[in-house]
Image: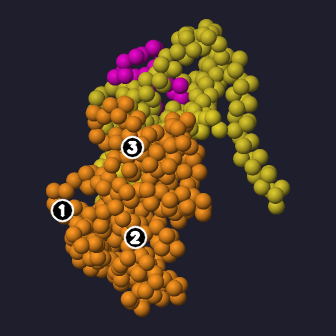
Amino acid sequence: MVGLLVVAAVLAVLPLLLILGTLIVKGAGSINPDFFTRMPVPPGDTGGGVAHAIVGTLMIVGTACLIGLPIGIGAGIFAAEWPASRIGIATRFIADVLNGTPSIVVGVFAWTWIVAKQGHFSGMAGSAALAVLMVPMVMRTTEEMIKLVPHSLREAALALGYPRWRTSLQVVVRTCLPGIVTGALLAVARIAGETAPLLFTALGSQYMSTNIQQPMAALPLVVFTYATGPYPEWHRLAWATALVLIFVVLVLSIAARLATRSRFDAPR
Amino acid sequence: MLPAEGVRPRVRTEGLTAFYGTLAAVKNASLSFAPNQVHALIGPSGCGKSTFLRSINRMHEETPGAHAEGLVALDGADVYAPRVSLRRLRRQIGMVFQKPTPFPTMSIYDNVAAGLRLDRGRSRAEMDRTVEEALTVAALWEEVKDRLHASAIALSGGQQQRLCIARTIAPAPEVILLDEPTASLDPQGTQRIEELLFRLKERYTIIIVTHNMQQAARVSDTTSFFYLGEVVETGATRQIFTSPREQRTEAYVTGRFG
């Protein structure tokens, strides 16, 4: 029986190891300073990099965080503090539905409401779509983390004369802040690799664009375009980009791990 | 309860009834608590003694669906009057809970200062002095003075509870409510808290809920016996434990039920 469980455990991590292995074999050779700092070269030439997509991903994901994190964390605090309120119950239900919604649906939605209305693709529309994906994830983890804080701590603060909002922010949220940060980082890792919503919104671009109101390149879009393109040089860049994406997700996950340590845990 | 003639009670309740939804957990309780004494509330689990205690500083109403009726007066002023500030009330009536509840993100110093930080304009030196004094009164200063900025959760259970007492007395309350403060402590920790109560009553009015009858007999000046939400009997602790007037009190203090 234990043998079967071991087999299951190995099978569970095997795909990840295969993916990592393949990416390193095919992509690591192309990771050099040029890859991060240069623009793509025309088909036929060799060399070049994906600087435009790195900038694009940073801007799109950064803007998505600016929109999504405050809303998600705020809604999570609300749902945890007023769990039985009508708004709390409704928000929780909608967040659960939204959590299960395929990201391509969110992309189409963003296309309908932003791209079609504005008449052009834009990085901003991509940020909005990613923010919509992010909010329910962040909200639910925030709520769960707050619920883990013992009720006795809340009572202790109230008994000291703390008003309710101060109890909530300075004692309860502060106590579970590492958990909330972890949830936020995992959500960032999750949306950083999303491709489908960006296809309908940011669209992708061959050029360096720092105007978020214009179509923008992004790392997942580069993988999508280059991997399906006809040129070997593109395939090479696609492998390297995929490796970078995985690496970003890995770094964010490790950061999430580190964030769960409180400042008092360090010496022990 | 019968405070000595001429002594004005610090806390007085009149017909206090406390509800959870429609269920009355405390029924028509009228008690007075004289200053600078330790008052014990005893009785079996679920008899309403904790609810009664929590009604005094209005923590009871923080439970969803709970409310209280009747009078609770602090120095003659109704604490349930419409304009009463909960923040001021709870600074006048401090509370210590069954489980030690240090704030885990805060250092020892910050825990004691937590209540003081609610008002602005205290100088650093003044804050340091108040924190030291509170820790000294709580008999914890000697043990923690070299690690004031270390985590509060690294302390032992008994130390944590004394820290919570320091946190409660730092804002200078008049009354301290203790809800089974030694229930989660070992005998040594319990003893230190009990010794502390003797010193605390020189400054404060103390009302303590306890499950432990020996503890009530050891630490308190007056005792009230609660049963099924009602105050059955109240009087000097010695009288309650040696010559109770009510049969139910006698049955409880002699260990026949509860």
Separation of marks 1 and 3 at Cα, in angstroms: 27 Å
Q: Which residue is mark 1?
A: B77
The tint chain B carries is: orange
What residue appears at the point 37 percent right and 57 percent down from the top-left corner? B202
**Which residue occupies the foreground of this view, A147 or B186?**
B186
What residue does disc 3 label? B114
Which hue belongs to chain A? yellow
* B246 over B223 or under it: above or below: below
For this view, does B169 lie left or right of residue B147?
Answer: left
In terms of sequence position, does the residue under pointer 3 or pointer 2 come before the other? 3
Q: Which residue is pictured at 55% across the width and 55% down the height?
A: B158
Residue reaching furthest to the top: A45
Label 3: state its secondary structure: loop
Secondary structure category for the residue under label 2 = loop
**1 vs 3, front mark:** 1
Packing grade of label 2 (10 A; few <14, some 14-19, many >=20) is: some
Q: Amino acid at mark 2?
A: Asp
All told, the count of numbered labels is 3
Question: Is residue A36 in view?
Answer: yes
